[in-house]
Image: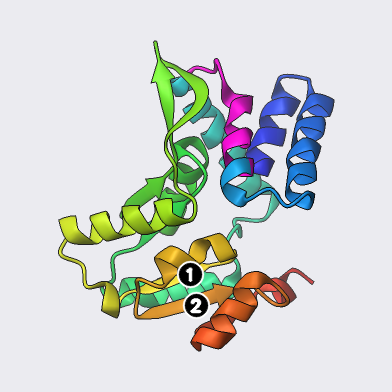
Amino acid sequence: MFELLLFDAAEQKCLEDGLDFLAGLRRLKSLGAPRELTNREYFRWWAGRDVEETSELGKRWFSQALEEHGGRVVFEEMRHRLELHRARGDRIVLVSGSFSPAVVPLATHVQAEDILATELVVEAGKYTGEIRTPMIGQGKAVAVRAHAARGSVRLDLSHAYGDDISDAPFMELTGCPTAVNSTNSALALHSQRAGWQQLDTRKEAK
């Protein structure tokens, strides 16, 4: 989400504004603001932006990211796990607090069948900057439960991956939750107490 915003700011030749905006979100977090609040504040950047143009922006951003990283925008271990899920015939669903311009290109890249992402209010083809359907914390759990019901998915046989304590509500619905890169975090403590699997991909970045 942050990278997309900076890419947009660079295209609009207001990179400093983008950096200042993100610094403000980090300040909120440092003051203890819940992720639900910082997520909501993030989308104010997109107020007044054309939906279709933002979608094309997302495609340009992801294409550049692929080029810069040699096509590797997913950690190798996570890519391997996704391949195993596909080989078993599992349905891959991306559950994200981000919105479609950022998530759709990634979903296409990893061959995800479905997306559950934050939906923004749209008026006259433009984002208002307000959220219609949040996808953070309990919002993810509600969406995952509804998605499973529609598709007759057995959540007790499903896997879930998350990297923040706000992901715990939806991860707890599944039979095989895995905490990703959660060392020394609230999610790490929660997952250790619950006996969840741990996955650390950060060594791949070294």
Taking depth in this image into account, of 108 and 24 the one nearest to the observer is 24
Mark 1–mark 2 CB contact (< 8 Å)? yes
Q: Name the residue located 20 percent from the left edge and 67 percent from the top edge.
A: 153
The quarter of the picture where the N terminus appears is top right
**Residue 157 position (above or below residue 127):** below
From the image, give the main secondary structure of the stretch colored magenta. helix
Amino acid type, mark 1: Tyr
Tell me if 114 is positioned left or right of 55 in this view: left
Mark 2 surroundings: few (<14), some (14-19) or many (≥20) residues within 10 A? many
Q: Position of residue 90 (x, y in %)?
A: 28, 71
On the image, numbered disc 2 is attached to which residue?
178
Residue 82 point in image, percent of width and height: 43, 70
Q: CA distance from mark 1 to mark 2?
A: 5 Å
As shown in the figure, which amino acid type bears the numbered disc 2?
Answer: Thr
Q: Which residue is mark 1?
A: 161
Q: Residue 158 placed where, x, y %?
A: 32, 74
Residue reaching furthest top?
Answer: 124
Identify whether 178 is placed above or below 48: below
Quadrant location of the C terminus in the rendered image: bottom right
